[in-house]
Image (tube, grey):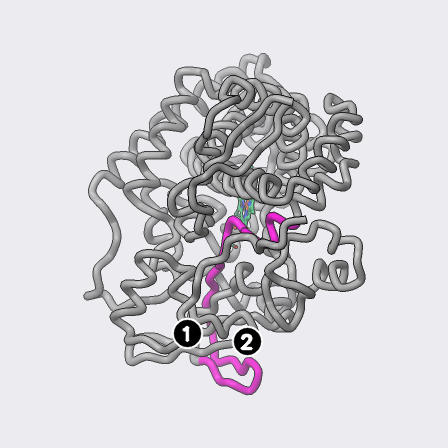
């Protein structure tokens, strides 16, 4: 049993000036935060320019996400860096527009549809296992490999094409350029800095966004023609383009479909790639759990959706990974009127930050919060915290529509990879989590792959 704890960024202990905070933030959102947040229910930051509160109290999070979500819309700031790429996508909208989009999107991810997507997901997992096998015997940067795998899952399930498809691979490359040019989770997203502070809208952002939207537009146009001709494949894109809003009967228009496909690609591949890479790293760090996953996967029929959905150890490992390294580390909402939270008054338009990163490691909620222990999900504390203090996919009506999809995807990919290979630590220093678009490793995650 390894007594080492999984990597955690060093938080800061003292207070800093606003300017220094902004600079720390720009470098990395996680290490900019004070350590005391891991044990706090709430923290209020007041500056001459803005009010901001971080809430870690399960009752308050419940209020924000489930009881009165309409009173706490997504902050427009979050979308600043994303607008050129995502247009009017469901990730950015609020109110009636958002509700209408979810009425069309949610049915595409319902249980039965998930089962229909499984063969495409499994084909991507088999292809990933082959790529991992081809890299056996040397040290590999795992995030790049899981990113490739997760992008493949999205293209196969959405458009029935593998990532090797010319348009798919070009879109994937263009997304990477976009992310390098414009990190999505930036200081502007979490803290409403005054206008004169530097924005991080780097050159190339708009051009990259146009290129991506052009490529996606080509795919959706072709699909529209196939739907009209009656020969469209029964995948997620067809589902999204043919489902009518049950209240109005309207369907997504062409441009809006491009917005939604862009967010599915972005929300669906970066997040899963990050979680998978951390899961593999954790399994290299805790070989006893790796063997349990490999044994479970080896004994199962991985071609069967129900069998994969029932891989309990693998699922608990993936859940534990999402606890320790939630791919979306923080979410931002905004008050629309004066509020009182834990006897503190908040003015209208205060930014409210919900931090899965801190909540999932809260010292007053979780037993052994920083330890990797997939067994915790079968304990009383684990079950209680799963209900109250575990939100890797958010919660309430704005919960991630891809949550069920992502859980099956994670388990399916881990099972396929670990049935074929062992992952081992290398001599390089451990990865340090930093938050960019998702929680990634500062210098990548390196592992040695060994064939079984
Ligand atoms: C491990 C994988 C994933 C994680 C951890 C994750 C997490 C999240 C979280 C936390 C949100 C809420 C963000 C907020 O409210 O600020 C979200 C929203 C969203 N996710 Fe996921 N996600 C994952 C995979 C996926 C997949 C596979 C898809 C689609 C194929 C997807 C599509 C979306 C969309 C469209 C939204 C916006 C929903 C809305 O605002 O109404 N996600 N996701």
Residues shaded magenta: 320-346
Instruction: Read off the residue under disc 1.
Output: 13
Q: Is residue 165 visible?
A: yes
Ligand 1 within 8 Å of the CB at mark 2: no
On screen, residue 325 above or below 443? below
Circle 1 sits in a helix, a strand or a loop, which is it? Answer: loop
**Residue 69 appears left or right of 351:** right
Q: Tell me residue 433's x, y (percent).
A: 45, 51
On screen, residue 366 above or below 404? below
Q: Tell me residue 258's x, y (percent).
A: 43, 33
Magenta run includes residue 334: yes
Q: Tell me residue 198's x, y (percent).
A: 21, 60
**Nearest to the observer: residue 272 or residue 312:** 312
Residue that appears at 34% across and 61% down: 25
Q: Tell me residue 196's x, y (percent).
A: 19, 66
Tag of residue 40: 2
Magenta run includes residue 243: no
**Residue 205 appears left or right of 449:** left
Circle 2 sits in a helix, a strand or a loop, which is it? Answer: loop
Q: Residues within 10 Å of mark 2 (few under 14, many from 20)?
A: some
Residue that appears at 56% across and 53% down: 6
Q: Is the C terminus in the top left, top right, bottom left or bottom right quadrant?
A: top right
On screen, residue 174 above or below 388? above
Residue that appears at 36% across and 57% down: 28
Of the residues under marks 1 and 2, which one precedes in the sequence?
1
């Amino acid at each position: 049993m390894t007594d080492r704890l999984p990597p955690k960024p060093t938080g800061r202990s003292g207070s800093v000036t606003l300017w220094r905070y902004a600079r720390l933030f720009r470098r990395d959102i996680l290490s900019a935060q004070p350590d005391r947040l891991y044990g706090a229910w709430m923290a209020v930051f007041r500056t001459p320019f803005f009010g901001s509160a971080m809430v870690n109290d399960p009752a308050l999070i419940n209020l924000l996400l489930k009881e009165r979500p309409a009173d706490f819309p997504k902050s427009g700031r979050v979308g600043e860096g994303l607008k050129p790429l995502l247009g009017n996508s469901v990730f950015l909208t609020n109110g009636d527009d958002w509700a209408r989009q979810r009425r069309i999107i949610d049915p595409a991810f319902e249980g039965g549809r998930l089962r229909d997507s499984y063969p495409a997901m499994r084909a991507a997992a088999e292809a990933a296992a082959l790529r991992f096998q081809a890299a056996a015997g040397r040290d590999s940067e795992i995030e790049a490999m899981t990113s490739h795998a997760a992008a493949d899952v999205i293209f196969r399930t959405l458009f029935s094409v593998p990532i090797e498809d010319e348009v798919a691979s070009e879109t994937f490359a263009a997304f990477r350029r976009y992310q390098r040019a414009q990190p999505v989770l930036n200081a502007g997203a979490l803290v409403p800095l005054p206008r004169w502070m530097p924005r991080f809208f780097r050159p190339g952002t708009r051009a990259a966004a146009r290129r991506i939207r052009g490529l996606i537009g080509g795919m959706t146009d072709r699909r529209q023609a196939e739907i009209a001709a009656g020969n469209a494949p029964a995948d997620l894109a067809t589902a999204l383009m043919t489902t009518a809003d049950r209240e109005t009967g309207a369907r997504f228009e062409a441009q809006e479909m491009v917005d939604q496909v862009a967010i599915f690609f972005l929300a669906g591949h970066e997040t899963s790639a990050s979680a998978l890479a951390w899961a593999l790293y954790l399994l290299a760090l805790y070989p006893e759990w790796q063997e349990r996953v490999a044994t479970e996967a080896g004994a199962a029929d991985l071609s069967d959706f129900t069998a994969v959905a029932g891989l309990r150890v693998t699922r608990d490992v993936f859940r534990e990974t999402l606890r320790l390294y939630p791919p979306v580390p923080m979410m931002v909402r905004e008050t629309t009127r004066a509020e009182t939270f834990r006897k503190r008054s908040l003015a209208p338009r205060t930014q409210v930050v919900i931090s899965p990163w801190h909540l999932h490691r809260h010292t007053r909620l979780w037993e052994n919060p920083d330890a990797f222990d997939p067994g915790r999900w079968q304990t009383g504390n684990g079950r209680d915290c799963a209900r109250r203090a575990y939100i890797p996919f958010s919660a309430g009506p704005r919960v991630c529509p891809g949550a069920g999809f992502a859980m099956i995807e994670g388990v399916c990919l881990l099972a396929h990879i670990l049935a074929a290979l062992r992952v081992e630590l290398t001599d390089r220093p451990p990865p340090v989590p930093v938050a960019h678009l998702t929680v990634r490793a500062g210098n990548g995650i390196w592992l040695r792959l060994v064939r079984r």
